[in-house]
């Protein structure tokens, strides 16, 4: 069986979803989970987009040893140099350079003639090869590019030293038959096609990103670019979990194997959802809460008699039910530290560990059983190091009573100076947010407020995501607590800190 390379672009194309921009620390956490899942290539970002992006790519390159770490770069020397610098610490580093090849992009966006585009592509690949041996070239909007021109460009960049040729359906326009046809034609007609790995990168505008990617695999593609939960520009990218499980479940059809440890899929999905604030729809294939639930009596009866009557995959094979009961009130610091490291969570330094352990003890006082998901939520909640926070939640009182207008009183430390405020609102969360706002005066627009239970039961922690927008910048704040008003206040304060501290804009590269 041929090997299918899984190229994850959650940290780059996924980050291009509105509001999904991630901090350096968040990117490193996700990258470590991707490495644990044995993703072949992690596209960590677009190093030239901003100093923040550069640092994030560099941090991922330093933290990851087993997967290849990649940075995107336009076909321009400055971008490529930055990408090369950012991936320098990587054990295996790749530069992914791209330029658009469709008439509509060349004429209206690049304002370049086809020959200029071809020359820029060749120069970009040659320059990238002086910085690393592993160079990938993408023809942006390949789906709407003329096939003759595409063949010319690919032949030239392969001669220039590209090792992977990526064919993107940038606008999610293709359909499976046509996408497979395009790959067959390219592989047949490009004379040096056998010297490279052919890669597919599909967007989901017509809901066919996964189907198109799989059609490309059937036609000879041996790398798929995809994201966890299908996150990405507009309607998103092909979803990693669906691609991996499709080729695994139907190996009779695809005859390829990935190196992915599928039991890490659900933990990765949860982590990405928590960090980005993008919930997973319950009926989402593989990672949705209902993906393995059987509602109808006939189905339940069938599954009880013989699981395979209605199930083509096993829930535990993709990492469901790994939410183990792990720790309790009496667990010590060592047990806590060990379980965190088993979960792939590494806290930097004793101070961070002590702070997280203190929170764990507080949680264990309220909630007798601590599950793995509680630990993930606790660490997400702890992710912003207190000393760099502009605002800190000191205390909160919220009051609700039937027939009375809800009321909240908060104390917030702004640059270590305590300020108090109270407010009324439609509910306790509304009152809390307006009290915090009367201290912070951020004037940010609230784009999203969502609450999810971390585990089962009414003593579960609530994990709250707050998405704020101000001056073109969109940030997500996360907070977790067994009291959802407190979790909401933490999430709001976390979002305010990100607005105050974020140094980078979300790079909106492709259309
Ligand atoms: O969709 C696209 O064309 C891209 C390229 C930069 C690979 O994301
Ligand atoms: Zn894309």
Image: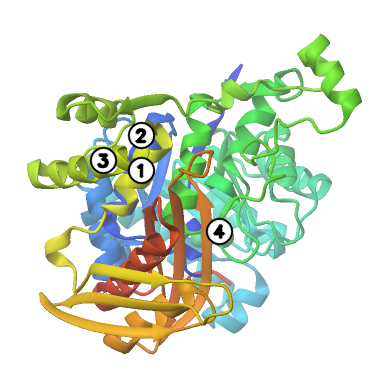
Q: Which residue is mark 3?
A: 360
Inspect this view and state whether residue 143 appears.
Answer: yes
User: Which residue is tagged 2?
Assistant: 67
Q: Residue 68 is drawn in which quadrant? A: top left
Name the quadrant where ligand 1 sits: bottom right
Q: Residues within 10 Å of mark 1 (few under 14, many from 20)?
A: many
324 vs 289, left or right, is left
Q: Which mark is residue 31?
A: 1
The reply to whether residue 97 is in sight is no
Does residue 39 sit above or below 511 in this rendering? above
| Disc number lying in front (2 or 1) | 1
Local SS, label 3: helix
Q: Position of residue 239 (x, y in %)?
A: 61, 45
**Mark 2 / mark 1, whichever is N-terminal:** 1
Residue at point 60% right, 50% down? 280
Q: Ligand 2 closer than 8 Å to the CB at disc 4?
A: yes
- In x, y percent, where is residue 504? 31, 73
- Residue 232, numbered circle: 4
Depth check: give the residue in front, 405 or 382: 405
Q: Which is closer to the viewer, label 3 or label 2? A: 3
Tag in front: 3 or 1? 3
């Amino acid at each position: 069986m041929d090997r299918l390379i899984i190229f994850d672009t959650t940290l780059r194309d996924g980050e291009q979803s509105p509001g999904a921009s991630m901090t350096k620390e968040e990117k490193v956490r996700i990258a470590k989970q991707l490495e644990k899942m044995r993703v072949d290539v992690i596209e960590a970002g677009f190093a030239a987009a901003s100093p923040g992006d550069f640092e994030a790519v560099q941090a991922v390159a330093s933290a990851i040893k087993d997967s290849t770490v990649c940075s995107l770069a336009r076909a321009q020397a400055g971008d490529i140099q930055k990408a090369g610098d950012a991936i320098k610490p990587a054990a295996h580093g790749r530069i992914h350079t791209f330029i658009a090849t469709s008439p509509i992009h060349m004429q209206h966006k690049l304002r370049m003639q086809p020959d200029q585009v071809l020359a820029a592509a060749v120069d970009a690949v040659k320059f990238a090869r002086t910085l690393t041996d592993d160079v990938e070239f993408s023809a942006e909007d390949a789906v709407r590019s003329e096939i003759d021109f595409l063949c010319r460009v690919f032949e030239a960049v392969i001669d220039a030293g590209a090792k992977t040729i990526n064919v993107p359906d940038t606008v999610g326009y293709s359909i499976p038959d046509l996408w497979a046809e395009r790959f067959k034609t390219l592989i047949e007609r490009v004379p040096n096609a056998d010297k490279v790995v052919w890669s597919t990168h599909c967007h989901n505008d017509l809901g066919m990103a996964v189907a198109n990617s799989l059609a490309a695999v059937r036609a000879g593609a041996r790398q798929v670019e995809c994201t966890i939960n299908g996150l990405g520009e507009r309607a998103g990218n092909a979803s990693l979990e669906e691609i991996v499980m499709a080729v695994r479940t139907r190996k009779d059809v695809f005859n390829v194997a990935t190196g992915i440890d599928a039991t890490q899929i659900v933990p990765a999905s949860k982590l990405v959802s928590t960090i980005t604030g993008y919930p997973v729809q319950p009926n989402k294939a593989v990672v949705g809460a209902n993906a393995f639930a059987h509602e109808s009596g006939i189905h339940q009866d069938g599954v009880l008699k013989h699981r395979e009557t209605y199930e083509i995959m096993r829930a535990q094979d993709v990492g469901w039910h790994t939410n183990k009961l792990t720790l309790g009130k009496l667990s010590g610091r060592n047990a806590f530290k060990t379980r965190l490291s088993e979960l792939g969570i590494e806290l930097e330094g004793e101070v961070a560990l002590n702070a997280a352990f203190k929170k764990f003890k507080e949680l264990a006082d309220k909630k007798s059983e601590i599950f793995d998901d509680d630990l993930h939520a606790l660490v997400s909640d702890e992710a912003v190091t207190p000393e760099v926070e502009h605002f800190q939640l000191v205390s909160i009182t919220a009051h609700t009573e039937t027939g009375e207008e809800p009321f909240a009183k908060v104390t917030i430390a702004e640059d270590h100076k305590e300020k108090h405020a109270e407010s009324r609102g439609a509910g306790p969360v509304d009152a809390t947010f307006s009290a915090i706002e009367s201290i912070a005066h951020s004037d940010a627009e609230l784009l999203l407020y969502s609450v999810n239970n971390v585990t089962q039961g009414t003593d579960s922690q609530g994990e709250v995501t707050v998405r704020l927008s101000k001056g073109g910048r969109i940030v997500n704040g996360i907070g977790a607590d067994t009291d959802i008003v407190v979790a909401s206040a933490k999430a709001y304060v976390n979002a305010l800190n990100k607005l105050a501290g974020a140094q980078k804009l979300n790079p909106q590269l492709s259309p």
